Image (cartoon, rainbow, N blue to C red):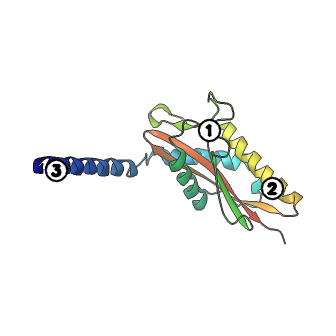
Amino acid sequence: MKKLKRLAAVLLAGIMALALFTACSDSSDPGNPEFDPKVESAYQKALKTKFEKELENGEAVTNDADIKRLAIEHIEEKHGADSLTGSARCKTEGDEKTVVRQVQLCYDTKSSKPNAFVPLFYEAANTPNITPDKMSLRTLYYAVEQEIEAAKKNGITLELTALGVGAKTIGGKTYVAIGFELTNTTP
């Protein structure tokens, strides 16, 4: 009986050690420190072009740190999903009275399910030229327009004050999330 207890204790300790090492390896994934910034730069340039009219005052041209942080958090939460609904693609933060930030995962529409989206990703080895996804850019632009118009109907003036992008490589796949910040400028 004593030997059985010892054997069980040794096996349990081994399983716990294995679980510890497995958890550590997932959380310490360094991603792709060379490729991630290239993807972010390509998307930031595309955002600047897409939102040219809205950026008359020169704001929102740089990659906003808060939006980038929120984008990477969202990628880390959703990267393994087989498909996402429209609302699961997005993540919002802010007090929604003075400022709101929203990010959305860039997506592919090649899902077999209706109204479901597959997270878009790039693979550094297979992507010599990074081409930002036009559908994701249009969707973000549309979301900004809708937010501004809905607020206007309620007598609120929203201004686009920042744009941002986050890219993170997880398991050899580089995922992208893009976002915006709207600020209430109602007098």
Which residue is pictured at 68% across the width and 37% down the height? 134
Could you tell me residue 166's position as x and y percent?
Answer: 56, 51
Amino acid, disc 1: Tyr
State the mark number for residue 107. 1
Q: Give the labeled residue for mark 3.
A: 5
Q: Amino acid at mark 2?
A: Ile
Question: Which numbered circle lies on residue 148?
Answer: 2
- Residue 53 visible, this orientation: no
* Quarter of the picture holding the C terminus: bottom right
Q: Earlier in the sequence, mark 2 or mark 1?
A: 1
Q: CA distance from mark 3 to mark 2?
A: 66 Å
On screen, residue 18 above or below 120: below
Residue drawn where x is 80% and y is 50% of the image: 146
Residue 120 visible somewhere in the drawing: yes
Q: Residue at x 54, y 39 (%)?
A: 81
Question: Where's residue 155, x and y in %?
Answer: 88, 63
Q: Position of residue 96 (x, y in %)?
A: 72, 64
Task: Please rate how many residues cluster around mark 2, counting C-alpha atoms within 10 Å: few if below 14, some from 14 to 19, many from 20.
Answer: some
Say which of 113 and 143 sits in front.
113
**Closer to the camera in the image, 66 or 126:** 66
| Helix, strand or loop under label 1 | strand
